[in-house]
Every structure is written in C-alpha cells, then in structure tokens.
Image (cartoon, helix red, strand yellow):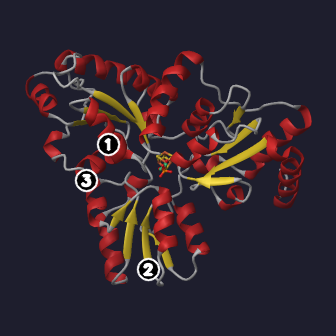
Amino acid sequence: LAGDDELHAKIMAVKEKLGEKLVVLGHFYQRDEVVRYADFVGDSFQLARAAKEKPEAEIIVFCGVHFMAETADLLSGADQSVILPNLAAGCSMADMADIDSVQACWDQLTDVLGSEPDEDGRLPVIPVTYMNSSAALKGFCGENGGIVCTSSNAATVLEWAFERGQRVLFFPDQHLGRNTAKAMGVPLEQMPMWNPRKPLGGNDEQALQDSRVILWHGFCSVHKRFTVDQIEKARSDYPGVRVIVHPECPMPVVDAADEAGSTDYIRKAIDAATEPTVFAIGTEINMVNRLAAEYPQHTIFCLDPVVCPCSTMYRIHPGYLAWVLEAYAERGEVLNQITVEDNVAVPARVALERMLAAKP
Ligand code: 13P
Ligand code: SF4
C-alpha cells in the first residue's frame, strides 16, 4: 500500500492535470485526509446543488455515500460521470427502506385512504423521501406526486407536501420526520409509524385516517447513539453550554438540545458565534473534530464520549481516491461509476427538481 506522501503526490498530480475537468465533492462527515482534496465540502443539499452547478467537469468524484453519488448522477449532465471511490460506502439508514416494501405499504395505504383528491384538490397522501434513500425511492416519489427532502429543508418540503396532500408518508428516517412534523405543530398522536409486520385493520386503519404524517421505521445508527443523559452531563460539566444536534437524533434528544439542524446549520451556528462559546454537538465525530480544530476560540466536543464515526462514510480512504483518479487520468478508465437507469432517473429527477424549486 502506498504511503500517505505517495498518495498525496498522486492525487495532487491528477488534480493538477485534469484541472476544471475534475470536481471532487466531499461530505462534512468525511475524514480530514479526504476532505483536504475536496473542491467543495458541504451537507447533502449543498452537494446535490454543487453536482448540478459544475457542467464543465467531465468527472465528479463523490467522497460521500452511495445515495449521494446517485443524486449527483441524477442532477449532473449526460456527458458527466460520477465516481464513488469505494462502492462499499453505503448508508445503513437508506437501506432500511427498499422499493418493494415501500410499494407494498403504498398499496395498502391507498386501499385504506383512497387515491382521489378532495374538494380542495389535495391527494389523500403524498410520499416524501429523505435524501438518504435509493434513487428508486426518489423515482417512486416522482411518480406519485411526491418529493425529496434533506435535513436542511425538511420543514419547507413538508409545507409543500401539506399544500398538496392531506397527509404525508415520510421515509426512511422516522426521527427526521417526527422532529420536523412536531416542530411544525403536528401532534404526536397524528404520526403513526408504519409497521410492515402488521396488516392493516381495526385501530391501525383509524390511526391512518387520523394521521398527518405516517412515519417509516428507519433510523441512523450514528445519531441514535445520542441521549438525553449525555446532554444533561454536558450541561452539568459546562454550565451555559450550547447544545446543537442533528435532526436524525431521537425526539427526546432534539427536545433537550438548544437547537437542531443539518450539518451545515451546525457549522454556520459555530461560525456565527462572536463570543468564545462551549458547544456540545450531536453529530458525526469527524465533522465535530474538524470544527473543533477550525474554531480554536470555542470549546467544541461531541456529546457521545465513545467515538462515533459513520462507518460507511469512513470507507472512503485517500487510497481509493488515488486509485480512481489515476485510472481516469492515465487510461481514461472510469472506475466505480454510479449510474441510475433512465426508468428510475426520469421520475427521480422530478422529485429532486421539486425539492430544489421548493427551496431557492
Ligand atoms: P446532512 O444533510 O445534514 O448533510 O446529513 C446527511 C447525513 O447523512 C446525516 O447523517
Ligand atoms: Fe447514513 Fe447515518 Fe452515515 Fe448519515 S451518518 S450516511 S444517515 S449511516
């Protein structure tokens, strides 16, 4: 295996050679050794837009996870190729909703709730998928009057959906769905969770009729680790601490925090603090450690004392980056290309474009 210096030299040489033809995108959760090569670092919403806004690049190397690279392929031009340096970089939450289970849920829901609009033209249910989902689910939303959201625009997107529907089916992340709907004033009893093991009938049917948001049972294994106890400990160790968590955290954690927001929200909140402040952060450790190094005037630490990286984000290593970059620069070979087939891509783009139009 090549050493760090050798990998660095290889990656820099390819970046120099390809210039504007190459763009490297990096999610905030990527390790520092990868982030240093990214032309743009952002949250999943910003990276989706960045992919769309770089028409001069022939190659988009996405340092993130599979669903993000798929989104980049959906939003980039036909003559651009998207590469995921390690194909094993998936997202366990995205894998918690597959198209067959969502379709089966939809069929049962529409049996109970119908599919005809009411007198105001609102459909009985609008599907909303979190960006952290396969392209097939985005396509499903595009085909069924639905939309995509990210953690930075979930409330805007839910408003969009409530204008067009009486209720929302939100997947895969139950926590983002619950936290966002609760902040918008939806009572908890109007948020039943879809249970695939329980056929509809009796009370379930009534709960669905009365619902505003039907949640899916997905969650993020990283954000599920944050607890109210950790927040209480931070408050007792550092009186006056500002606690900010990602909305993928469970509801009691979001409620106990001072603020909740996307990765970019967290970064901006720290950036905007003018006085030295203690921040306890509930999100992935690579991002928290980077923020702590970038803002030495503040005390910034992760709420979870046991290191909690996103293990799949971590699968992108500079070695993989060097490998895919060299193959393209030297042999024109596009390794680990992510492509979404047209039958899925066309409706998935509809759902993504609705999201991009919902938030300028
Ligand atoms: P952001 O949309 O905040 O970047 O989050 C993506 C993600 O995967 C969080 O776990
Ligand atoms: Fe998926 Fe959680 Fe990793 Fe985000 S942090 S990519 S939701 S597993």
> Distance between the Cα atoms at labels 2 and 1?
30 Å
User: Which residue lies at the image location 59% right of the left edge and 30% below the top edge?
Assistant: 74
- In this rendering, position of residue 84 left or right of residue 235: right
The answer to whether the residue bearing label 2 lies less than 8 angstroms from the nearest atom of ligand 1 is: no
Q: Are marks 2 and 3 in contact (CB under 8 Å)?
A: no
Residue 200 image offset from top left, x and y in percent: 17, 22
Asked which secondary structure carries label 2, the reply is strand
Residue 337 appearing in the image: yes
Q: Nearer the viewer, residue 139 or 355?
A: 355
Give the amino acid at mark 2: Val
Asked whether residue 131 is in view, the answer is no
Q: In the image, is residue 129 above or below residue 106?
A: below
Q: Is residue 134 above or below residue 201?
A: below
Q: Is 245 left, or right, of 32 in this rendering?
A: left
Residue at image mark 3: 183
**In this rendering, the label closer to the viewer, 1 or 3:** 3
Picture residue at 46% right of the left edge, 60% below the top: 265
Give whichever of discs 2 and 3 has the lower sequence position: 3
In percent of width and height, residue 292 lies at 56, 73
User: Which residue sits at x=64%, y=33%?
Assistant: 76
* Percent position of residue 159, x then y: 30, 41
Query: What residue do we see at 78% from left, 31% from top?
Result: 334
Q: Which mark is residue 278?
A: 2
Q: Are marks 1 and 3 in contact (CB under 8 Å)?
A: no
In the displayed structure, does residue 127 sit left or right of residue 131?
left
Residue type at tag 1: Gln
Residue 83: x, y in percent?
70, 36
Q: Earlier in the sequence, mark 2 or mark 1?
A: 1
Q: Secondary structure at mark 1?
A: helix
Q: Which residue is mark 1?
A: 174
**Residue 94 has which mark?**
none
Q: Around disc 1, counting alpha carbons within 10 Å, would you say few (fewer than 14), some (14 to 19), or many (20 or more)?
A: many
